[in-house]
Amino acid sequence: MTRSAFTFVLILCACANTTAAPVPPAVPDPMKDRDGYPLPKGATARLGGWPFREWQGHGFVFSTDGKQLRAVIDAARVRAWDTATGKPVSGAIPINWGKESKGLRGVASTLAGNRAVWVTQPIDRAAPDRVDPKAVSTAYTFDLTNGREISRVQFTGRVEFDVLPHMTWAATVSAGGEYLAVAPEESKTVEVFDLTTGKRLHALAITGAEPRLHIAPDCKCLYVFEYKQPLRRFELVSGKELPAVAGTEPDVWQFEASADGRTLATLEWIKKKGANGREESEGFLTMRDTVANKSRGRLPLDATPLDFGFAGPDAVIVLAAKYRQGFPPLYRFSRWNAVTLKREWEVEVPSLPDKFSRRIFVAPNGKQFAFTNYQDFLHLYDTATGKIVLEPSGHKTWVSWVGFSPDGERVTTLAPDGVRAWTPTGVLKRSTSLPELTRGRSDATLLGEHLVWVTKAEDGKPAELVGWDRAKGAIGWRMPVENDGPERVLTPDGKRCVGVSLNVSKRVWDVTVYDGPGGKKLPAWTTDLLASKGRGRFPAVALSADGITLFVAGDGIVGLDAVTGKEVLKIDAGKFEQTDGPAAFPMAVSGDGKRIAVIRGEPRRGHVLRVFEIKSGKELAAHTLGAMHHPALRFSPTGKQVAVWNVWDAAVRVCDADTSETPVRKLDSAGSRATCAAFSPNGATLAVGYRDGTALLWDLTAK
């Protein structure tokens, strides 16, 4: 036996006589959530997951093979996700601008196939926030597979892309990124460029009246719409004008051609008189045969079309809304045959906040389509069935309210799609669907420390005041209320409620006290102290922790007896000028009843949080917050801290309620924007809900 062989035998013997050490259990990475996504610094858990996390950007598109979803993050990065898993592919794709980027300002960007196009203009030093319409713009085209520049073209004037190549605005890129058509402001021309060679092909004369452009996916035809004129057609490469699209004299808001170019879908609007005699707008979606140049007819949607996209030569995916007075719209996806005009399937779209852009993106292979709402949600659907491909574990809508159970062992999140209960480590324990939420006012700006909301009357059902029992995880009580109920409900304990509503005819505010569990309506009174410059502009109000005093911000902060309306105290806090938003000047009272905090806009300082001692009226702290949109606030259980958030900001600020000297702590999600927040019973943790349907738990004891 050789020496080396003998040594090997000794090692085997030693291993055979050695007891293996126990393998310690795997410890979860404290810097990642349960889905493997990183947590921001200071966060301990994420409640709910979402595919394509942090995709938010300025544009979104499928890759040519449909295997990736891509989004423009900023002027130098494009992020990509795997459509099969929703996971990031390889982080951000770098774009090499080169030295020419210095002194330039990006004014437009879009993605198309495997290419990205950015339009820039020189910065106007005299007015850096404005773009000179006579300046020379440069369109850079990059290869998304390697980040290298393909070409650059120049034209005079300013243009804007929409976030979709197929949308019909004053600049559009072909589906594969081969061609660019632009109609610069005030130029009265449409210029067409070959983005592979960087050459300008031709310029077409137009009137310049609000032009909208679309390049057919087969790159054979360019469509140009001008206000109150028929939809014009041109050969894309040669510029030869073709016969205008017949029957398109109404306002064509959006138009898109199928992949083979044989079908054109147009979303049009007409004016008509409604049932009340007033002029109303009606939208409809028409399928057109481009070869015969005639209409095949309108799709019988029975709803208002909002967006659409082709999923093959003869299939159209449509997003439509059915509007109901006083209620959120009902959204539906449907698939239609563009030739027979027959519906193939229809599914419900998650209830999403109104008045925001909704977009459909269809993969080039027609197998999937993505849907997004104002860059906060992204759903991936199967075009054959209408089913969601990747089901999120978070809410499908914004988180409207978050709160802890009395023992701190459960965290409740609420959204229009239901109520969910979580452990502090992010484990989902219970999910409850509540029809009451879909017909109620559960906006984040209207909900307080305790979860009580109003459901409107519908289909013979009366309006109700509904209270949620956090300990039981179920509705604790409900009671009928008159008309549509109060516009704002304040409650110290989730049982006794004070409702405030605008009395339009008398130009005063009605205040009503309710015993929720008992189902009784208690005393009511009116006041003109709640100054409001118009409907929809809600005054700043807060209720004391014992439910006895209603505080109103106007000429100072006035305390009114919640039962009689009699003034009981006043704090000299300056004059509050009302602005837009139901929570424009939010107020809150600490749990011990000693402090009151208010946020107001002040000249040269932006929004400022001011904390006052109620008994003496002395100002305890003032924290400058900067510019905010619809800010809201919440006291900690001890009353020593105030959490402030802002629906347009990803960060929540935690402020010292006793002094202005302590620096404001910023809890930044670096992703979606905050919608609501709540302290744990011991004040050590802050739960924050976000617009992407998830919530984060923040450790306030960590430095």
Image (spheres, rainbow, N blue to C red):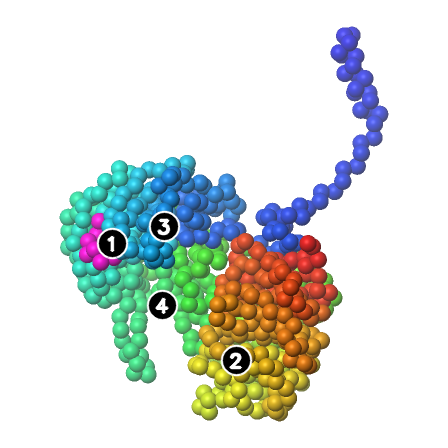
Give 181 or 371, whichever is nearer the viewer: 181
For the residues labelled 3 and 1, the Cα–Cα distance comes to 15 Å
Secondary structure beneath dot 1 equals loop
Secondary structure beneath dot 2 equals strand
Given this view, does label 4 or label 3 mark the residue nearer the observer? 3
Q: Which mark is residue 575?
A: 2
Q: Is residue 543 magenta?
A: no
Between disc 4 and disc 3, whose residue precedes?
A: 3
Q: Amino acid at mark 4?
A: Thr
Image point 71% across, 76% down: which residue? 592
Quarter of the image where one finds residue 450: bottom right
Q: Is residue 446 left or right of residue 473?
A: left
Q: Amino acid at mark 3?
A: Arg
Image point 31% across, 45% down: which residue? 139
For the residues labelled 4 and 2, the Cα–Cα distance comes to 45 Å
Secondary structure beneath dot 4 equals strand
Mark 2 neighbour density, 10 Å: few (under 14) some (14–19) many (20 or more): few
Q: Position of residue 546 (x, y in %)?
A: 69, 81
Mark 4 neighbour density, 10 Å: few (under 14) some (14–19) many (20 or more): some
Q: Is residue 605 left or right of residue 25?
A: left
Rendered position, 85 above or below 551: above
Q: Position of residue 410 (x, y in %)?
A: 69, 63
Q: Which mark is residue 105?
A: 3
For the residues labelled 4 and 1, the Cα–Cα distance comes to 39 Å
Give 662 or 697, whichever is nearer the viewer: 662
Image point 20% across, 59% down: which residue? 208
Q: Amino acid at mark 1?
A: Lys
Given this view, does label 1 or label 2 mark the residue nearer the observer? 2
Between disc 4 and disc 2, whose residue precedes?
A: 4
Q: Amino acid at mark 2?
A: Lys
Q: Which residue is mark 4?
A: 304
Residue 393 makes an appearance in the image? no
